[in-house]
């Protein structure tokens, strides 16, 4: 071995010197190049400067080492076949290092780019994985061509794999392309209140390239695939309005009527029972018609007026009782006092008391009611309108009619909330001006919705 080294030391020293020379040049070139590159990138203000420098600094010196090894082979004592094989191995290592660098570099740069995107947020992992796979496929093709392998089977295999993957993830791909279409149009943004033709509605809380998340007025989250969104007719009401300090919670009320066992055969008995009748009796006989006959315009009179007219033939008194504005009283006690006062005054002017005809006694009923919360809340006027469209007649009745008795003032729950939460006095006064005897509850619903929509446009 020593004799061989003495005879062939030149063939060993020369390749080694060449390799070391390339390493030294590589270190000098890297220092010079990256100092200038760093200054240029600092002036440009590009956010990916550090990533580019850190990712390529090590591979740059490694490539000079590969170049030195390639040059050293030309002066090595290896056979021609061994040199060719070694050169191909070095070339393959160079190609693999380029592929590895591109994967790392694109992954880090994509993370910066994706973080800057506000709406919609792309599926970062899906995109980075797609870029990695694409670079790897290109690298495989380059290596196959470099080694002289037949490309047709490789391309067919890759095409088959891509086709199978596309079929397996066709829904995801469709959603991503739909997300690109939504992003390009910029017609929907986070914070917008949208309504789909299929009925879904709410504020957009998150947008990705696959789905859109919506917060509904009943505080549920709906996830809508982008592919569905682009097929639907979408109404975009725009950005959020002023939000209330306390959301409006919608309630409803259920009524059960009950016979009290009390009855009257003439005006005297009617007045005597009314004086001691509980509020639930007064409430039933003066309010139930508003809800039960809400499709009639104008609504029927209260039960006392109807009975006096039909059973006693006291048409003048019946008209006086029918003219009592139930909606004008903020307490049932005040309403009862007015009814009793009207009857007593009529009896004083008309002493003759009539009995009922046949078996048409007035039977007193009372209303047993239960207040039930609904799942609906409204934090602004737009949400309020959308909930108004879907709540029941019972809920509207509770907040418009019964609120006056509960609040003990001439207002309703809607007006109080709008006035206190938003300072919208004119809008609240318009809703307060509703007259229940000249329109149905459905007409009132339409009136409130129209006035609020006119205000928020």
Image: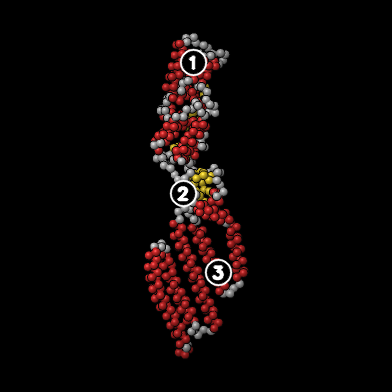
- Answer whether labels 3 and 1 touch (C-beta < 8 Å): no
x and y percent of residue 63 in the render? 46, 74
The answer to whether one can see residue 56 in this image is yes
Q: CA distance from mark 3 to mark 1?
A: 100 Å
x and y percent of residue 97 in the render? 49, 71
Mark 1 vs 2, N-terminal side: 2
Mark 3 vs 1, N-terminal side: 3
- Answer whether labels 2 and 3 touch (C-beta < 8 Å): no
- Point 49% across, 15% down: residue: 317
* Residue at numbered disc 3: 140
In the depicted structure, whether residue 341 falls above or below residue 29: above
- Point 47% across, 34% down: residue: 448
- Answer whether labels 1 and 2 touch (C-beta < 8 Å): no
Mark 2 vs 3, N-terminal side: 3
* Residue at numbered disc 1: 317
In the depicted structure, whether residue 273 falls above or below residue 212: above
SS category of the residue bearing label 1: helix
* Residue at numbered disc 2: 190
- Point 49% across, 73% down: residue: 94
Q: Nearer the viewer, residue 175 or 364?
A: 175
SS category of the residue bearing label 3: helix
């Amino acid at each position: 071995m020593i004799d061989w080294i003495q005879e062939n030391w030149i063939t060993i020293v020369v390749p080694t010197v060449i390799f070391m020379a390339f390493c030294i040049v590589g270190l000098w070139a890297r220092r010079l190049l990256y100092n200038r590159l760093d200054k240029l990138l600092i002036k440009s203000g590009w956010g990916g400067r550090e990533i580019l420098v850190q990712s390529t600094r090590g591979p740059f010196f490694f490539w000079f080492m590969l170049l030195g090894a390639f040059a050293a082979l030309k002066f090595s004592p290896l056979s021609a076949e061994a040199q060719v094989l070694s050169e191909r191995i070095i070339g393959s290592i160079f190609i693999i290092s380029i592929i590895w660098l591109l994967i790392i570099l694109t992954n880090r740069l994509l993370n910066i780019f994706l973080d800057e995107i506000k709406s919609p947020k792309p599926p970062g992992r899906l995109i980075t994985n797609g870029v990695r796979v694409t670079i790897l496929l290109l690298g495989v093709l380059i290596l196959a061509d470099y080694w002289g392998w037949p490309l047709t089977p490789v391309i067919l295999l890759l095409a088959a794999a891509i086709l199978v993957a596309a079929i397996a993830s066709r829904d995801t791909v469709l959603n991503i392309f739909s997300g690109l279409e939504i992003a390009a149009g910029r017609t929907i943004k986070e914070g917008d209140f949208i309504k789909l033709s299929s009925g879904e509605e709410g504020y957009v809380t998150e947008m990705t390239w696959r789905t859109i998340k919506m917060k509904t007025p009943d505080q549920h989250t709906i996830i809508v695939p982008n592919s569905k969104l682009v097929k639907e007719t979408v109404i975009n009401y725009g950005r959020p309005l002023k939000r209330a300090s306390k959301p409006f919670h919608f309630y409803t009320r259920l009524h059960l009527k009950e016979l009290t066992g009390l009855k009257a055969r003439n005006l005297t008995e009617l007045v005597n029972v009314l004086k001691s009748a509980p509020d639930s009796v007064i409430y039933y006989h003066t309010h139930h018609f508003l809800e039960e006959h809400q499709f009639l315009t104008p609504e029927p009179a209260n039960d006392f007026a109807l009975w006096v007219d039909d059973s006693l033939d006291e048409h003048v008194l019946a008209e006086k009782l029918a003219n009592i504005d139930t909606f004008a009283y903020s307490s049932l006690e005040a309403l009862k006092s007015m009814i009793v006062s009207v009857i007593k005054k009529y009896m004083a002017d008309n002493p003759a008391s009539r009995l009922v005809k046949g078996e048409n006694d007035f039977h007193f009923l009372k209303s047993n009611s239960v207040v039930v919360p609904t799942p609906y809340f409204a934090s602004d006027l737009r949400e309020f309108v959308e909930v108004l469209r879907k709540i029941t007649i019972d809920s509207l009745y509770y907040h418009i009619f019964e609120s006056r008795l509960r609040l003990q003032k001439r207002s309703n729950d809607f007006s109080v909330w709008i006035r206190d939460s938003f300072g919208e006095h004119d809008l609240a006064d318009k809703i307060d001006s509703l007259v229940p005897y000249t329109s149905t509850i459905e007409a009132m619903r339409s009136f409130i919705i129209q006035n609020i929509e006119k205000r928020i446009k």
